[in-house]
Amino acid sequence: QQPVQSPQAVILREGEDAVINCSSSKALYSVHWYRQKHGEAPVFLMILLKGGEQKGHDKISASFNEKKQQSSLYLTASQLSYSGTYFCGTVPLEYGNKLVFGAGTILRVKS
Amino acid sequence: DSGVTQTPKHLITATGQRVTLRCSPRSGDLSVYWYQQSLDQGLQFLIQYYNGEERAKGNILERFSAQQFPDLHSELNLSSLELGDSALYFCASSVGGQGQTEAFFGQGTRLTVV
């Protein structure tokens, strides 16, 4: 049930863009995106609900393809503060209470 | 500060012992999730409670148990501890219990089993 994230890691220079992908084998009710810095708690970024409703930050956006059970997180004009591990979490339609996370994508932004 | 409080922050204990981790959710949140994160690993879903009732279970070991009390705080009990149980344990809370609202994470309890 664990969603699959790609890439596993990415290195960027400040100002560059990145895309992180998340896919599930299950029909999904929602997709959640979080960022975790080393030694800290995961911080909420974005939630995407079945039906197209979207919330989140202004410099970070995301898409949710319900038919393909895929989501992508778009980071534009990356900043040093974007560095961290990004996790997508999925809630399947079948088990509406399980928020299960992928293995994470390590993002490092260099100056 | 997410508003989710976990105690203690650090815990060192010996193999075979039992410990209790505590989580106080944000005011108004009815749902509590527990996760285990081993060194540089992902977030493994353990269990979820909503308004006092167990709603979902992950790969939680039989040696582990949890409950959510009427005041909505939750406790995760880990018994017969093994070295491999050393990890960061997070709880998260959300308003809804169906995955339709964001979850906010506490700072975690770092458990070290020696």
Image (cartoon, coloured by chain):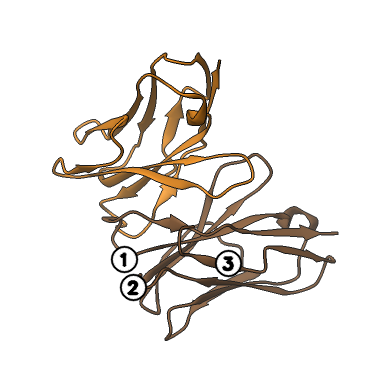
Chain colours: A orange, B brown
Mark 1 or mark 2: name the one nearer the start of the chain: 2
Marks 1, 2: nearer the viewer: 2
Above or below, B92 against B73 in this view is: above
Residue type pointed to by label 3: Gln
Q: Is residue A87 left or right of residue B14?
A: left
Residue B43 placed where, x, y %? 54, 47
Distance (Cα) linking label 3 and label 1: 18 Å
Q: Classify 10 Å Cα crowding around label 2: few (below 14), some (14-19), many (20 and above).
A: few
Is disc 3 in contact with disc 1, using a CB cutoff of under 8 Å?
no
User: At numbered mark 1, what does the secondary structure look like: helix, strand or loop?
Assistant: loop
Above or below, B6 against B73 in this view is: above
Q: Quadrant of residue A51?
A: top left
Identify the residue shown where x is 49% and y is 57%: B1
Q: Which mark is residue B95?
A: 1
Is disc 1 in contact with disc 2, using a CB cutoff of under 8 Å?
yes
Give the labeled residue for mark 2: B28
What quarter of the picture does the N terminus of chain A occupy?
Answer: top left
Q: Chain of mark 1?
A: B
Residue B8 placed where, x, y %? 67, 69
Identify the residue shown where x is 29% and y is 56%: B101
